[in-house]
Image (cartoon, helix red, strand yellow):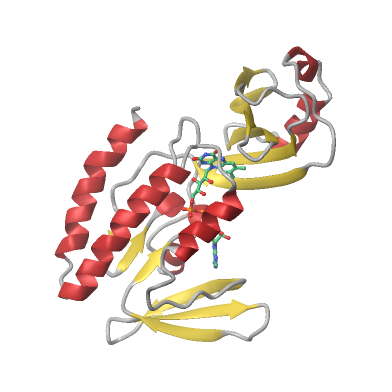
Amino acid sequence: MVLNITDLYQWLALKSEHKSRQLLFATKFLSTTLTDDGRYLSQVRSRLTPISQIKSKYIVDGSGVHNSVLQSLGLGEKPARTGVNIEYEYPIGSNKIDHAILFVGSAVLSGYGWVFPTADGKLRVGVGVIYPDTTASPKTLMESFLNSSDVHRFGLELTGEYTVDAGTIPSIAYDPQLVFGNVIRVGDAANFATPTVGEGIRICMENGSNLGKALGTAIGTKSSEPLKKIRGHLQKEIPNKLSL
Ligand SMILES: Cc1cc2nc3c(=O)[nH]c(=O)nc-3n(C[C@H](O)[C@H](O)[C@H](O)COP(=O)(O)OP(=O)(O)OC[C@H]3O[C@@H](n4cnc5c(N)ncnc54)[C@H](O)[C@@H]3O)c2cc1C
């Protein structure tokens, strides 16, 4: 799925606009503890305000590869294998708008590279490698690719101002344990991204939404049954998706 990420995040945030919710921007979750009354007391810090505390019955860990909440509670660790990616976005120029390229081999050992046109007139060129299978820096591989004859061989025109996006995703098998009492993990924090090509957006959105609905029902009915059911549902669904 090739998407405009900023528009997608704004669209996702708007989906809860009519609900009672508070968005805390530029705010970092620091830690949480389970208190005697079975609730969680979490510390957060923003750029503008000092550390503040939030008390909650449930916590959803959607912190991606960081597993911030699970780590804080000693319930999980950062994944041992990760996909480390870098992507440059160029003006589309004379590049073909209906051609995508995937490349493997000596240019990106222990990973792969990609070239995707976007719907808004850009060309994304990226490489991703698996750590610790390699220690090669994706940025170095990207620069070598850009300076190589492959650019010409693939018929690419990579000129003009470009933006850089980089990040890390888990690259380990799906683990069906999603619910730890009143702590639930979703998305990359639950290794939803496929280990084969690192595609995560569609799976994280779909299953995050299903988990959110199950949590809503659990809160409304004061029963943990909906969360137990969704775990079984995802256990069947996700391995099927991974084998597609
Ligand atoms: C360069 C790159 C290209 C990709 N391309 C594609 C693609 O083309 N198609 C596709 O399907 N997938 C792609 N992926 C994978 C996809 O982006 C992920 O699978 C998906 O974003 C996972 O969503 P998520 O919300 O679970 O985690 P994330 O998108 O990682 O979001 C987690 C958020 O939590 C925040 N966070 C972490 N710790 C804390 C903390 N302590 N306090 C506050 N916030 C915290 C992070 O800053 C981040 O914003 C790509 C990934 C990368 C890195």
Relative to the observer, which residue lies in front, 241 or 122? Answer: 122
In percent of the image, x 22 and y 40: which residue is there?
236
Q: In this view, does 188 lie to the left or right of 149?
A: left
Q: Where is residue 176 in the image (x, y as percent from the top left)?
A: 28, 47
Relative to the observer, which residue lies in front, 170 or 133? Answer: 170
Q: Looking at the image, can residue 82 be seen? A: yes
Quadrant housing residue 208: bottom left
Instruction: State the quadrant of the C terminus.
Output: top left
Q: In this view, does 95 lie to the left or right of 237?
A: right
In percent of the image, x 37 and y 74: which residue is there?
19
In percent of the image, x 31 and y 78: which residue is there?
57
Q: Position of residue 101 (x, y in %)?
A: 62, 21
Count the numbered circles shown: 0
Q: Is residue 18 left or right of residue 167?
A: left
Quadrant housing residue 164: top right
Q: Looking at the image, can residue 178 be seen? A: no
Q: Position of residue 230 (x, y in %)?
A: 22, 54
Against 241, is 39 above or below? below
Relative to the observer, which residue lies in front, 150 or 4? Answer: 4
Q: Where is residue 202 in the image (x, y as percent from the top left)?
A: 42, 43
